[in-house]
Amino acid sequence: MLSFTRLPRAPPLAETNPVCYRLCMTSLIYVLNGPNLNLLGTREPEIYGAGTLDDLETLCAETAEGLGLAIEFRQTNLEGELITWVQEARQKAAAIVINPAGYSHTSIALMDALLSVELPVIEVHISNVHTREKFRHHSYVSRAAQGVICGLGFAGYRLALIALSDILEEDQ
Ligand code: CA2
């Protein structure tokens, strides 16, 4: 009678081989949203549209799925938390989409975090910041972004994910 000894299972190749990792693993994109974006859909629909933050997450998740990407979608009202998430992305993500909201125009600390993350970053604004108040025309974050999309509503996030899909494919 034949008997079999059960051998320990080898780890998946993608976990041990960096080339296979790049080709086989779904790229994770951090989609980060700054202060007050939790209010989407509740106020100022003439500027930000009628959709909620949940609607925006659904749009991003569906877009990512169609592109073969995965997303981690988050919103915070705290500058330090946004910075911590950017630092975390360095270990866990392939790229970042960020709408820093009001911190775009004020935060050198967030800019520094994004400059040191060594990942492709796309900055998105729902409204066209250049047709609004002068203080919205400058973004510290833009210095750390590979691309900036503004004024296209929620579709800006979709376009950012499509652009990152191309950028990540080119990097392979
Ligand atoms: O247009 C954008 O996406 C902004 O990043 C939104 C920020 C603003 O400070 C930037 O200049 C441009 C404000 C987010 C506030 O979001 C709200 C949404 C609904 C109701 C009230 C605020």
Image: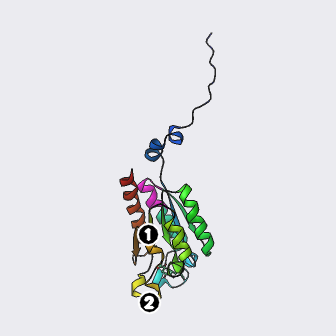
Q: Position of residue 53 (x, y in %)?
A: 54, 72
Q: Residue at x 54, y 59 (%)?
A: 90
Horizontal side of 72 relative to 149 (left or right) equals: right
Q: Residue at x 57, y 36 (%)?
A: 11
Q: Which residues are magenta?
A: 61-69
Q: Residue furthest bottom?
A: 133
Q: Which residue is identified by label 1?
A: 145
Q: What separation in Å lies between label 2 and label 1 (alpha carbons)?
A: 21 Å
Observer-nearest of 150 and 107: 107
- Between discs 2 and 1, the one toward the N terminus: 2
Q: Which residue is identified by label 2?
A: 134
Horizontal side of 93 relative to 76 (left or right) equals: left
Disc 1 residue type? Ala
Q: Where does the N terminus fall, quadrant-wise?
A: top right
Disc 2 residue type? Lys
Q: Are marks 2 and 1 in contact (CB under 8 Å)?
A: no
User: In this orientation, does residue 147 appear?
Assistant: yes
